[in-house]
Amino acid sequence: MAEKDRKSSYEEETQSQTLDSAAQGAVDRLVAILEQVQQRASATSTSGGGPTQIEKDAAFAAAAFSLIDNGLSLRPAIDLISLTPPSGSVAGNTPVSIFGANFLPGATVTFGGQPAQQVVVVSSSELQVRTPPRNATGAVDVVLTTFGGDAIKSGGFTYTS
């Protein structure tokens, strides 16, 4: 990979992480506002002379949530393409690299509904995890969940004895 491409990729990932942090900060602030609105709503009644502060706060919170929701829906879809290796022991702890597109920091992965261990987002196209143990052999679905959505690889990993 050329130096320019690596720098561009790093800048895109850093920008995505910054946007994710900003979005989380906005969500945290909106939750705090809504809690304040609920507390004041029980103590205040509407007077007939225009919107109360509670009504203004509620309108602001609704508009802000709408903006965040629209922004999140514009993110590219998560794509889970392949796992290497595609199989491992029922004892678990098999190191697995997951490849795809649009992976985000904070990703979680499940194998047959059980959470993977040591999930590391290497890049927007690679995760590294360790499989959880399982009581039975056979293929299981692998589900990748991030702030930007979910991706499922049906029968994506096979547990062996």
Image (cartoon, grey):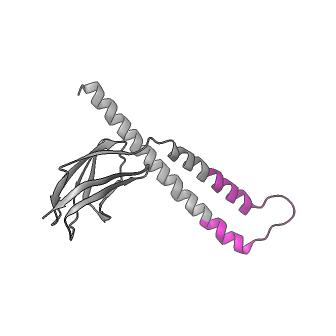
Residue 66 visible in the picture: yes
**For this view, does 97 lie left or right of residue 100?**
left
Nearest to the observer: residue 68 or residue 34: 68
Residue 6's place in the image compared with 137, above or below, is: above
- State the extent of the magenta-drawn residues as a range: 35-64
Quarter of the view holding residue 2: top left
Q: From the top left corner, tell me how far across and down residue 151 is, in percent.
A: 38, 50
Q: In this view, does 158 lie above or below 13?
A: below
Q: Nearer the viewer, residue 83 or 57?
A: 83
Please identify the quarter of the rendering in which residue 154 is found. Answer: bottom left
Residue at x 55% of width, y 50% of height = 69
Question: Residue pushed farthest left?
Answer: 161
Residue at x 21% of width, y 57% of height? 158
Quarter assignment of residue 4 = top left
Vertical arrangement, residue 21 with respect to residue 74, above or below: below
Q: In this view, does 142 lie to the left or right of 68?
A: left
Residue 76 forms part of the magenta stretch: no
Q: How many labels does the image show?
A: 0
At 43% from the left and 43% from the top, the residue drawn is 77
Left/right placement of residue 53 relative to residue 67 reads right
The percent position of residue 74, horizontal first and vertical second, equals 51, 41
Question: Residue at the location (31% across, 42% down)?
Answer: 100
Residue 94 visible, this orientation: no
Magenta stretch secondary structure, dominant: helix
Quadrant where the C terminus sits is bottom left
Viewer-proximal residue among 125 and 112: 112
Could you tell whether 140 is left or right of 47 in the image?
left
Q: Position of residue 125 (x, y in %)?
A: 30, 41
Question: In which quadrant of the rendered image does the N terminus lie?
Answer: top left
